[in-house]
Amino acid sequence: MKRLAILSTHPIQYNAPLFRLIAADPDIELKVFYSKVTEEVRFDKDFGQEVTWDIPLTEGYAHESFAASESAGLQALIAGIKGFGPNAVLVFGWNFAGHFAVMKHFKGSVPVWFRGDSTLIDPLPFWKRIARKLWLRYVYRHVDKAFYVGQANYRYYRWCGLQESQLVFAPHAVDNEFFMKDDEERQKRTLEIRAELGIPKEAFVFLFVGKLEAKKQPVELAQAFMEAQFQGNKSAHLIFVGSGQLDHELRATTKDAQNIHLVGFKNQSEMPIWYRVADMLCLPSKGPGETWGLAVNEAMACGCSAIVSDRVGCGEDLILATEFGTIVPFDQPSTWGRSMADLIESSAPKARIVEHIQHFRVDAFCNAIQGQFR
């Protein structure tokens, strides 16, 4: 049996299904080491509230937490990993307290594997780009294998100096089955929500999901929607699911718009229903840091197509050269409304969208890990 130590910051809803899947493999003994303790992550400053997810994040796998931002905590973390005796250490992200220190400590004695989703999409001044490249080439010299999530992430790793032989494809994914199950029951609740919001059954619904923050451009999206010229028989509505710093500004901007609905933060167990309320997800982020956009995976698992900006990392893999949405320029909100209007008339069948996202599955990452132990 092989022992795998995973280093991550804290329990994250996207990672829990993967960790449970690995732990269920009879040939792998897994232990997850968290570099932050609960007190460090309880309050989400971007959502502006404490966030307690209503799905299990730490069940089904062994784990332990450390305060790696403190010297004693970091030493305890390294000692804990060493005591576990892993055959490989898989690090999620290097730019967190303690993570790079762990990579440096184990490099050369235990294979160091890496998972991150960084890209080169966000531009930098020439001097910063050179400095970044030099630093990252040093960082990634401490990595033996990297699991890349998509094409933009692959190019980033190559730019950072990793060789083709060091890269393993493990697509960014969510628990598709969680979002796809109980479809009939969830569809009934969808109709109830539409009725509660005053949205006709046949209306076309756009959806924004996420933190209401400047980089995601929710206010610009609302303005583009209000300026759009929708034609044909279908009415159009826009729903915002989320909270954050721009909540008051967004409400002020949309106060007279009867077809825009701000419903606040919704927990994870509710999201499969809200995605079904909609027909198309909108993620017009300008970045920086929209390295993938897992909300797009979630939405597609529920049958939604998507509009994303050209600063969203998943666009190339999930949207480009498909009929499941479109990519819009992040800095031209005046064009978004036209794209939204056009897509009402050309939206793909939900069944085909669900089939498409099945190529991006959590078990693909699990299989990639298993392959490295063979």
Image (cartoon, rainbow, N blue to C red):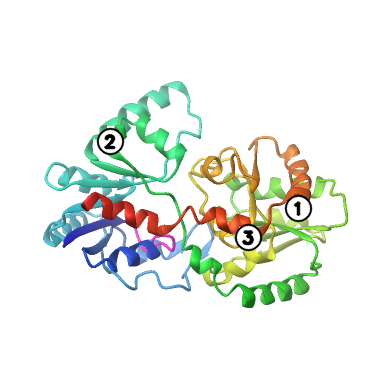
Label 3 residue SS: helix
Task: Tell me residue 90's x, y (percent).
Answer: 26, 52
Q: Amino acid at mark 3?
A: Ala
Mark toward the start of the polypeptide (3 vs 1): 1
Main SS of the magenta part reads loop
Identify which residue is drawn at 18% across, 46% down: 111
Task: Tell me residue 353's x, y (percent).
Answer: 61, 55
Task: Using the image, tell me which numbered label, if any, was put on residue 351.
Answer: 3
Does the image show residue 82?
yes
Task: Using the image, tell me which numbered label, if any, was put on residue 165.
Answer: 2
Identify which residue is drawn at 27% across, 66% down: 25
Q: Is residue 340 magenta?
A: no
Q: Residue furthest top?
A: 126
Which quarter of the picture shows residue 267? bottom right
Q: Amino acid at mark 1?
A: Thr
Measure the C-alpha gap from mark 1 to mark 2: 51 Å
Residues rendered magenta in the picture: 9-15
Tag nearer the camera, 1 or 2 = 2
Q: Is residue 143 above or below residue 51?
A: above
Label 1 residue SS: helix
Q: Are marks 1 and 2 in contact (CB under 8 Å)?
A: no
Identify which residue is drawn at 50% across, 30% down: 123
Measure the C-alpha gap from mark 3 to mark 2: 36 Å
Instruction: Kindly identify which residue carries mark 1.
Output: 253
Is disc 1 surrounded by few (<14), some (14 to 19) or many (20+) residues within 10 Å?
Answer: some
Identify which residue is drawn at 80% across, 64% down: 202
Task: Using the image, tell me which numbered label, if any, was put on residue 308.
Answer: none
Q: Are marks 3 and 2 in contact (CB under 8 Å)?
A: no
Q: Is residue 207 above or below residue 340?
A: below
Which quarter of the picture shows residue 180? bottom right
